[in-house]
Amino acid sequence: MIAMIRLVLCLLAMVAASPLWAHELRPSVVELRETQQGEYVLDWKVTLAVGSAGMLAERLEPVVPANCTIQGEPSQRMQSAALIGRASLTCDGGLAGQPFGLSELLGKSDAIARFIPMDLPVQSFRLTADEPSATIQAVPSAFSVLFDYFVIGAEHIIFGWDHLLFVIALVLLVRNPWPVVKAATAFTIAHSITLVATILGYSGLPGRPVEALIALSIVFLAVEVALVLRDPERQTLTRTYPWAVAFAFGLVHGFGFAGALADIGLPQTQLATALFAFNVGVEAGQLLVVGLTLVVLAGLARASQAAQIGALKATTYVIGATGSFWLIERLIG
């Protein structure tokens, strides 16, 4: 069990040493759009890891349907840690059963692919490193949108380090399974409200203040955990009203999710399905993180009192230090 605790602490330390991972996962996007009869534009935006830009730019090539011809040379440029490209296509006949996408996705990254014909429903696909291209369907499947955006929602929690640390800190503070689940659900409901309102254009906040407030929410919970570790009987605001605090900060985190979805894009013809699947995926990811954290805490309870306190303090300080670093970086960066 101590080995598992050390592993968790090492992972948290990696987070603290990797500020570029602070924001939630933002999948790459590939879009094949019909501009007029027989004419298409293939656009792609590939999120890049540090140091991989040149290597990827040299290797990456667009995958186009067999009955399409690329007009001229595809263009590519670097912008905000992403490789952005475009190719103009002329196609002879229908594209059902034909592939489109990229020659590869670097590492284990994912991508959302969309086929947008002029007079037919939009088709959405999820690309992976193993399958970096998709096959256009004769009849689009609504299930593909449901599945793809569910996965994106779950990944935003599991790999979105700032949201992940918030959930872990919440569990460390509340501890009891049922109150934790209720607080996590309140967090989901809250961020769903601001996410949907922002996507539909009813609200919105600038990105930098939102990112700073998300970091502040992590620092706030870490401070409360530290106070409780010093005095186990202390009733902090979050221990007294866990669902209310989670709901309040969830409203802020929702603006962050909206920013990520704006980068990814949403299928306008299946907007409700995509938003529903994304939020369900976020809730599933949260419950998985909650469950794993509770399992670690249950195992830690078997250790000595000194070992328990030491492990919890170290974890809390790593979370607090990471949140503080992000807060300063986002305020002055």
Image (cartoon, rainbow, N blue to C red):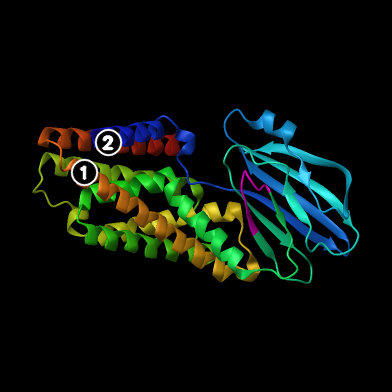
Q: Are marks 2 and 1 in contact (CB under 8 Å)?
A: yes
**Left or right: residue 331 compared with residue 166:** right
Q: Position of residue 295 (x, y in %)?
A: 26, 48
Which numbered dot is residue 299? 1
Task: Give the Cα distance between marks 2 and 1.
Answer: 9 Å
Quadrant of res 265: bottom right
Mark 1 neighbour class, 10 Å CA radius: few under 14, some 14 to 19, many 20 or more: some
Residue in view at x 23 percent, y 42 percent: 223
Residue type of the residue flagged with mark 2: Ile
* Helix, strand or loop for disc 1: helix
The residue carrying pointer 2 sits among few (fewer than 14), some (14 to 19) or many (20 or more) residues within 10 Å by Cα, namely: some
Q: Report which residue position mark 2 lands on.
A: 5
The mark that comes first in sequence, 2 or 1, is 2
Quick one: 154 or 195, which is closer to the camera?
Answer: 154
Residue 211 lies, in percent from the top left, at: 44, 46
Residue for point 46% across, 60% down:
281
Say whether residue 244 is visible: no
Whether the magenta-drawn stretch holds residue 14 is answered as: no
For residue 276, above or below residue 113 = below
> Where the N terminus falls, by quadrant?
top left
Q: Which residues are magenta?
A: 125-132
Which residue sits at x=22%, y=54%? Answer: 238
